[in-house]
Amino acid sequence: MSLFGDGLNTAVQKAFTRAVPKSAPAQMRYLVKQLKGTKAVAQMLRISQRTVERYVKDQIKKPRPDLAARLEREVKARWQPQIRAKARHKAATTDGIVIDTRARIGYTAPIGTTDEDRLRHLTVALPPRYAARLFDAQEQGATDQELQQIAAEALKEVYFQDGGRRAGSLEEVRLTDIEHVEFDL
């Protein structure tokens, strides 16, 4: 499970203007239309082409839980691409992104300071350049670890150093034992 990647996707999905299809047959019809055929959908969902056709014709209505989860994930990943792109662009250029996390946060600082990591719950508005970095990294297939590193750099600058007004000697911020992370545009 990709904590940071899924969190970014969920934040962007809040910008949707129309509801994602709810029923399995409607979701299947949407995917068939997007991928231009039942064969491609069958391969993507790891089911038979005949099964896809039966969903499209409303002959099957209730998928097994694992198929239902894959189906919903694939539909959400393709739903309203222009709205998704517009929301990402707005966050990356003007609005920024809000991160809400509960994690063990520590930092590397000069000797004689308290750099002991501790559990913190932070809700911080990050500037647009960090939203851009997060979305660009995600589009280029960054791992959750890489996304986490970008978020840690953002927290270092915005929360700990307050944009350069304090803690200037802070070297590195670490996020570990992440209990939860959520993003909002």
Image: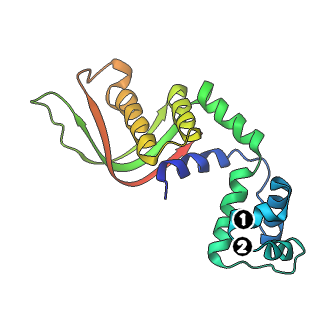
Rendering coords of residue 175 (x, y %) = 33, 44
For the view shown, which residue lies furthest in the left direction?
Answer: 112
Q: Position of residue 38 (x, y in %)?
A: 83, 65
**Residue 129 image point, x, y percent:** 52, 26
The residue shown at (37%, 32%) is 159
Examine the rendering and report whether any part of residue 110 can be seen. yes
Report the number of numbered marks. 2
Judged from the image, the secondary structure of the residue bearing numbered disc 2 is: loop
Q: Are marks 2 and 1 in contact (CB under 8 Å)?
A: no
Q: Which residue is mark 2?
A: 47
Q: Residues within 10 Å of mark 2 (few under 14, many from 20)?
A: few
Q: Nearer the viewer, residue 166 or 61?
A: 61
Relative to 174, say whether 40 is above or below: below
Left or right of 164 on screen, residue 169? left
Q: Does any portion of residue 71 appear in the rendered image?
A: no
Residue named by callout 1: 43
Q: How would you rate the neighbour count of disc 1 (Cα within 10 Å): few for under 14, some for 14-19, many for 20 or more? A: few
> Farthest right residue?
57
Screen quadrant of the C terminus: top right
Query: Residue placed at 72% from the left, 34% from the top?
Result: 86
Q: Quadrant of residue 123?
A: top left
Residue 86, compared with residue 25, is above or below; it is: above
Q: Is residue 113 above or below residue 164?
A: below
Measuring 80% from the left and 66% from the top, which residue is drawn there? 28
Distance from Cα at disc 2 to Cα at disc 1:
7 Å
Residue type indicated by callout 1: Gln
Q: Circle 1 sits in a helix, a strand or a loop, which is it?
A: helix
- Residue type, numbered disc 2: Ile
